[in-house]
Image: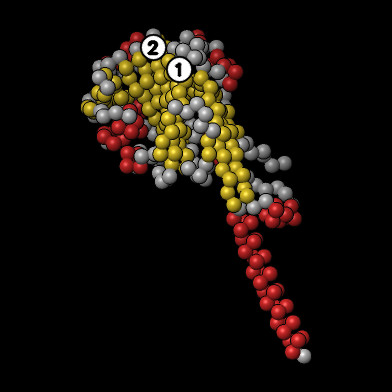
Amino acid sequence: MPKKQRKFADDGWAVWIDGDDVSTIYINDWLNPKGKSYVDFAVRIRGVMASKLLSVYVPFEVKKEEIEDVSLLFNDKNILQAIFSASCVMEYKKNEHTSEIAYNGKTVDIVHISSLNYKVSPLAKGTLIAFDLVNLQPFLDNDEAYFIWRMPHKSLDEVFAPRKDMNSAMERLKDLITTPIVAEKFGYSIRINEARLLPEEITKIGAFHRQKLKKAVVTLSVNESYELNDAGAYRIRRLEENLYKDFLPKGYKSEDVITYQWQQNRETNLKGHFNFYYNVNKNSVSRGSMFLYLVLLTVIGLVGDLLANLISKFIGL
């Protein structure tokens, strides 16, 4: 029996910091239903000097060599402006582990994770990524630090994977004739620090229950031919190609991309648990149906010409 392919991704993420911090997390998804999707994951820690360990649970398998340190691209002023939505002054690689940016009247340390000896280990059906903050602190000049990296979003790739049609040849032919419109519909849920979706190895960690996440910001970018339920989105815009062209994931096309952004904060989610849900839809004409219609029209034309010739000959006789 073939494996049933999912059309719904229910991602249960977890973020906790062992220390006295107030933090914001950012999930930036590059949706590519016809190719490979990626996610940029970022954590802004306020109170990093009093923190010991940053732990992130990723709800799918990821290897260390698949993690890309996109902070190394921040020496490009266009990318900086795109990420922080402000004009920034950058001191790039002020030491072996960090850079520093100044914007909107504050300074923040940018941590280059590729220079750190962080740990990546399998956990349940996902992956645990852990950063030692104590050994990093001598290289920090500010009490606010920003971590960011990119990973292939494998749970979304599974949802978007092409599906095998198991119907009989006659049923497929009938579908091609009667239903030329192909409706694609996918569901995507992002849940952050919801214990019901997390493995027991995490839920029994004391620091996980003491986390002080202040806010979660989710950004989805997808080609405009796909529709998203944008209810609650506080910002919708067309992706600025001139700013993002050197920051996009490999193979991701920047033309006609719409970016949607949502946010939730601790004031409305007192336990620091955040939940986002999206529908991704697209209606298109089946190429198979179009080809079949062209073949049928050609056959009908040929048969019509043949009948016309026969009738002409019959009348001539």
Q: Quadrant of the C terminus?
A: bottom right
Q: Secondary structure at mark 2?
A: loop
What color scheme is it? secondary structure
Instruction: Using the image, tell me which numbered label, if any, was put on residue 54.
Output: none
Instruction: Using the image, tell me which numbered label, if any, was put on residue 21.
Output: 2
Residue in the picture at 40% in, 22% down: 43
- The residue lying furthest to the front in this view is 315
Task: Say which of marks 1 and 2 sits in front.
Answer: 1
- Give the quarter of the image for residue 244: top left
Residue in the picture at 40% in, 16% down: 23
On screen, residue 154 versus residue 65, left or right, reads right
Q: Let me know if residue 139 appears in the view.
A: no
Above-or-below relation of 118 to 212: below
Which class describes the residues within 10 Å of circle 1: few (<14), some (14-19), or many (20+)?
Answer: some
- Asked whether the residues under the numbered discs 1 and 2 touch, taking CB atoms below 8 Å apart as contact, a structural biologist would say no
Chain-order first, disc 1 or disc 2: 2
User: For the residue marked with disc 2, what is the amino acid?
Assistant: Asp
Residue in the picture at 58% in, 49% down: 284
User: For the residue marked with disc 1, what is the amino acid?
Assistant: Asn
Q: Which residue is mark 1?
A: 265
- Give the quarter of the image for residue 24: top left
Above-or-below relation of 177 to 88: below
Above-or-below relation of 269 to 219: above
Q: Position of residue 276 (x, y in %)?
A: 53, 25
Which class describes the residues within 10 Å of circle 2: few (<14), some (14-19), or many (20+)?
Answer: many
Q: Secondary structure at mark 1?
A: strand
Q: Nearer the viewer, residue 32 or 49?
A: 32
